[in-house]
Image (cartoon, rainbow, N blue to C red):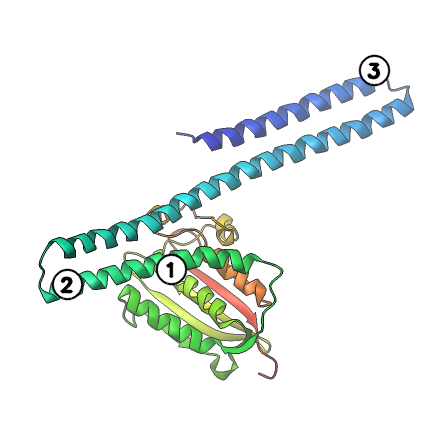
Amino acid sequence: MISGRRRSVIFFTVFGICLVAIAVALNVSWIVLNWRMGVLAILGVILFCLIIAGMVLNTIFLVREIRRNEQKDSFLNAVTHELKTPVASIRLYLQTLQARELDAEKRKEFYRIMLEDSDRLLHTIEQVLRAGSTRSRFRREARNRVDLGEIARECVDLARTRFHLDEQSLAFENRAGAAAVVLGNIEELKAAVWNLIDNAVKYSSPEIRVRVELEELAPDRVAVRVVDRGIGIASTELKRIFRRFYRTPALGAVRAKGSGLGLFIVRSVARNHGGRAYAESAGAGQGSRLTILLPKAPGI
């Protein structure tokens, strides 16, 4: 069943095409009937071009606004779910602890689950706040020398703990060594690397095989690359996945949790640090490879 917004996109597209066709027909007819009146014909052509340009721009604007609103609604639904679910879980366990006498082992398990839910809640809030801060073009902040190797190792260790993974499921390889030093904000770089790993793990179920690589790609460039064997990315989606609020329509996206901000933050952080972020994939079911490419600090 076609959604209401999709019907709106189709309507405005068809409507714009019809208007353009009518305008073309009227203008051609007018020129044919008045071909001797050269000045009026030239003015008519100019006016015709302006009308056509206005119709095309108006149609493009309407379609983009409809799609943008659809993405915002999807984001709000996702964030609402990400906020409501852990809060409801924490409340349920607290009510259970209040109403019943439980042994020490059970209480310890409840505390662990509530801590995990609170971490999930805090992560969602940080994602929303960071998405707004990294998008600002008027920020001025001090840049420090940061070792990407330490950041990647820290994020890998955290992911192994949080997702209960072993070294085979989440591997790390540092090929850059001491050359992986950049100028930047350590918290933003941690957020970018973490979001790459989190994204790879989310879309790799049921069998998780993720590899984090740190490599010197050029004398002045260093890359953090996350490779997975997950659901893959269609060629048409490789650039779209970095848009704000965007969630891939692949089958795995329906089950995966998230706000649609993770890869947007990755791209924003990379750009703020003078680098870029990009994705590679052989297609659906073929896994993917996402990379952050950053300039090395002077003197490295």
Q: CA distance from mark 3 to mark 1?
A: 68 Å
Regarding mark 3 in the picture, which secondary structure is present there?
helix
Provide the residue designation for mark 3: 33
Q: CA distance from mark 1 to mark 2?
A: 24 Å
Q: Residue at x 50, y 48 (%)?
A: 236
Dot 3 and dot 2 residues touching (CB under 8 Å)? no
Look at the picture and state if 50 lies above or below 125.
above
Provide the residue designation for mark 2: 107
Amino acid at circle 1: His
Provide the residue designation for mark 1: 123
Q: Residue furthest top?
A: 33
Look at the picture and state if 112 lies above or below 147.
above
**Residue 6 horizontal/vertical position (percent):** 48, 32
Question: Label 3 crowding class (10 Å Cα cut-off): few <14, some 14-19, many 20+?
Answer: few
In the image, taking residue 227 as reference, residue 61 lies left or right, namely right
Regarding mark 2 in the picture, which secondary structure is present there?
helix
In the image, taking residue 26 as reference, residue 260 lies left or right, namely left
Look at the picture and state if 114 lies above or below 16.
below
Amino acid at circle 3: Leu
Q: Is residue 109 visible?
A: yes
